[in-house]
Structure formats: C-alpha cells, structure tokens
Amino acid sequence: MPYLVAVLLLVLWEVLNRLTNISSVILPAPSTIFGALVRHHEVIAQNALHTFITAMIGFGLGVVTGVVIGFATGISPEIYSSVYPLLVAFNAIPKVALLPLFVLWAGIGVVPAVLTALTLAFFPIAVNVATGLATIDPEMNDLMRSLGARRDEILLKVGIPRAMPFLFASLKIAISLAFVGTVISETVASNDGIGFLMMSASSSFNVPLVFAGVFVIAVMAVAAYGVCSLVEQRMVRWAFRVQP
Amino acid sequence: MNAPVVALTGASTACSRPFVQLNNVSLSFGGPEGLLALDQVSIEVSAGEFAAVVGPSGCGKSTLMKLVTGLLPPDSGTVCVDGNVVTQPIKCVGMAFQNSTLMPWRNTLHNVMLPLEIVQPFKRERRARRDEHKARAERLLRAVGLGEFGSTYPWQLSGGMQQRTNLCRALVHEPKLLMLDEPFAALDAFTREELWTVMQDLWLRQKFSAILVSHDLREAVFLADTVYVLSKRPGTVIYRKRIDVPRPRTIADSFEPHFVNIVHELRDKIMQARA
C-alpha cells in the first residue's frame, strides 16, 4: 500500500506539472528528476557513498555515546532524576547552532558532519536506554530483593533485558537523525557529499539535480530505517509478542 | 522433595520460638511523625503454618508483607523470622503479588527458574545441575497443570495461568516462608477457587510457612490455619481466629454451615472495624 500511494503521488505530481507547465527551475517533474538522476549517476553515487559513510560513522559513535550515557544515567533513580533534565536541556539546543563551533574546531569536511550526526543521534538513544533502565516495576524490584538479588543482579536480569526494546526503538530514530545531521553539515561545511552536491547544484540552478539529491537521501534514510527496524524485530521479538 | 538447606541471612540476634514473629510492630509512612500505617501489630506464625491477614482496604496489609520480608524496617517493635531479628531483606522467601510480575522476555519455564539463578545454593550449582533445576521447575509446572506450557510466553497465558506460573516461581527454591499479597484478587471467581485448591495442594506437599494477605474472607478461611483481622488504619490486630476445618478442604466445604459461620464471624469483625 505505501508503495502504491507513493507512485500515485508521483503520477499526480507529473500530471499537475505538465498541466500547469511550471518551469523546471521552480519545480521539476519527476521524469525530469529521474533524468538528472540517470545523467549524473556517477557523481551522485560518489557523493551518496560519502554521505552514507559519514552518517554511519556519526551513527555508530552516537550509539556508543548514547548507550554509555544512557546506562550511566539510568543505573540509579537518583542519577536519573538529576541528569535527565540536563539531557533534555541539551537536546533543546538546535544542533545547527553548534555547527560553526565544530567547523571552528575541526575545519570543514567529514569531522563536523560526523559531530553533527553524533550530537543528533545520541540523544534518543541515551534517553531511551536511561528510561528503560530507570523505570523497573517496583514490584519486580521487591521480588528480586526478596530473593536476595544484589543491585548488579537486578540490573542484569531485569534492567538490561527491559531496556532492550527501548534501545532498539531509539536506533530507528537515531539513524534518521544521523542522516539529517550529516546532510546539514555538508550543505555548509563540506566539499563532498550529497548535501554539498545539492548546494552546488542549486547555486547553478540545476534544480532537477537538487531534487535527485533529495530523492537519494530519502532512499538511503528509509533503507537504513528499515534495516534498524528488522534488527529490532529480530532482537526483541518478545516485545512484539512474537514467539521467538 | 528435599528439605531446604538454605540458611536465612539478612537477620541477626536470636529471638524466641515461632517461625515468624511480629512483636508490637509499628510503622509510619514519612518517618515516625508521619501517617501511622500499622500500630503495635503482633502476629505469630509457627513453622508449616498457613496464616492469613484480612482487613478493610488501606489497613496496611501490604505494608505488613514488606515488614516481614525486611523490605521495610519497622519504626518500633521487632520482626523475627526463623529465630533471627530481621534487619534487611531476608533471603529464601517466596513472594507472589496480585500483579504476576512475570518477565515478558522469559518463557514460562525460565520465569519459574529465575529464583534458582539468584538464591544460593542453587545459583552456585546452576551450571552443574542445570537439568535437575529444569526438572524441578517442570515438576512444579505439572503440579499446577501447566506441564505443557513451559515454552510459552506470559502474554500467551491467561491471567489464571500467569498466577499459577507466579506461584511456581515463588516456590521453586523451596522457601521456608511464602508471602502472598492478594495473588488471586485479579482473577475471575471460578479461576480463583481453582487456584485456592492448587495453592492448598502445594502447601500440603511442601509444608512451608505462609502468610496470605487478602480481602476475600472465603479465601482466607479456605487456605489458612489462623486468620488475623486488622482494624482500619492505623492497622492493629483486633481478632485472631483458628480455622478448624479439616484438610484437605474442598470448594464444597466452603458452603458448609460451619465454614460459612466462620466467614460471617470474620465479616462481622471487619464491619465493626470499618465503623
């Protein structure tokens, strides 16, 4: 069904475009965009790969920092209640505002893109892991304590398994954000990547190529989301109430 | 089955005979100046005895459970279990709550085996005696009629089956003391009565001491040797009743005049307590 709707939307777009005879500098038709995609496929592929790798590095580092910070925050209710508001405050900062700093520290190129992707991606992971760990059912806690379980045993047998669905759900969100961060950074501070390609295409009024870039990013982000979603369903089948 | 060889730890200093003894225990929430929940409660449960605590809602029944197991310390008075004063969470106690608190990521068998991964000496032997532990859990599941359900997950079980699993988990490590906090309250009437019989069978077989907290008087009379009636908050024991109905009791027994009279007698006491 979603494929059908997507195709219908594209057809509608194409038809309206032809009827209104709108200039392709303003809004190119899907067929024109597809043409640009084919014509420039080499340069697109090269830059897409660059963006993909950058986003994956940012995502990977985001997972590591997110899990570490989330774990440290969720490990005790006291730390959770004092650190969680700070995490939220940090998340309220528009990450684009940090970009000039990243460029100042690291110059233009891959590094600021990785850093932007990381700062965007780590947050949902940290918050979810912390919440999963810190919100153990009090009765479950009593039960474990009445069996004589130590804190680390409660964490291992209850906290961590319980946090897993939270972690995997956050990965889907984080990976999309990693692409957002990478492309934003590339548009202002890079000479490579889809973001850079779109910026240079738009400055030469090659609007079909800009749209081709948008299309490629969308495909990559959706595919990455799909992979995360599959991993999630594999890893925490019980949370989906599927018999493993 | 073998007698449990697990020593109760988390307790110190000797005190006198009965297996569980509460001596003038008081507890307030929010410190000694706060809301008084239990006032000078004294209860004695001997080894192998089944006791029940009933009372109007909010009388501190659940608080009592936490006191006995050492999850909460009393403000005054002493709690003794197995000859020792309870000062921190005691070990080798089985607990079952109204909410079955099964772990959704574990199947029924592994949920039941959870205490064997935590309580000594089972924990130490869990690799060497893996098959034995598994057999023990499976035996219990068969005893409650869940023999075929070892590999199912909690959400695939009905509420009654979840509570059966919960009882198995509470008993798998053969605790000397079983604490039941309204474990059948959320079930329908027929399932509840069925589980009373299951509970009685398990108790007759293993002969642990048990304390049941309940607001269902028929349940308390059916299962217990002794019923304690608590007053409304602050909870204090206002009545103690030995139940002399012979064992094993059947659901049909619970409609006999003698049984019904006991229930009415307890009911009158609670009505007075609520007034």
Image (spheres, coloured by chain):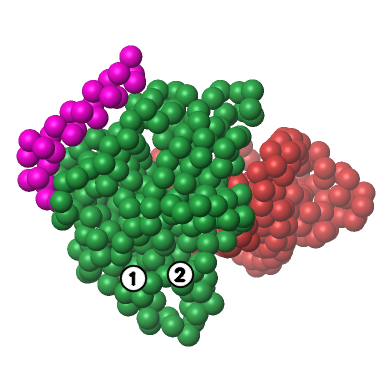
Chain ID for red:
A
Residue B154, image quadrant: bottom left
Instruction: Answer left or right for B267 relative to B11.
Output: left
Q: Eyeballing the image, is A207 above or below A163?
A: above
* Residue closest to the eye, B97 or A56: B97
Output the chain of dot 2. B
Q: Position of residue A34 (x, y in %)?
A: 53, 55
Furthest-front residue in this view = B16
Element at badge 2?
A: helix
Proximity of marks 1 and 2: CB atoms separated by less than 8 Å: yes
* Residue closest to the eye, A117 or B39: B39
Q: Eyeballing the image, is B31 above or below A12?
A: above
The type of residue carrying mark 2 is: Leu
Are discs 1 and 2 both within one chain? yes
Instruction: Answer left or right for B11 relative to A236.
Output: right
Furthest-right residue in this view = A104
Q: Position of residue B256 (x, y in %)?
A: 7, 39
Instruction: Answer left or right for B183 relative to B7.
Output: left
| Magenta stretch in the rendered image | B249-275
Label 2 sits on residue: B116
Magenta: main secondary structure equals helix
Characterize the local packing of mark 2: few (<14), some (14-19) or many (20 or more) Cα atoms within 10 angstroms. Answer: many
Instruction: Answer left or right for B159 relative to A55.
Output: left
Q: Residue at x 28, y 67 (%)?
A: B140
Label 1 sits on residue: B137
Q: Residue at x 64, y 29 (%)?
A: B31
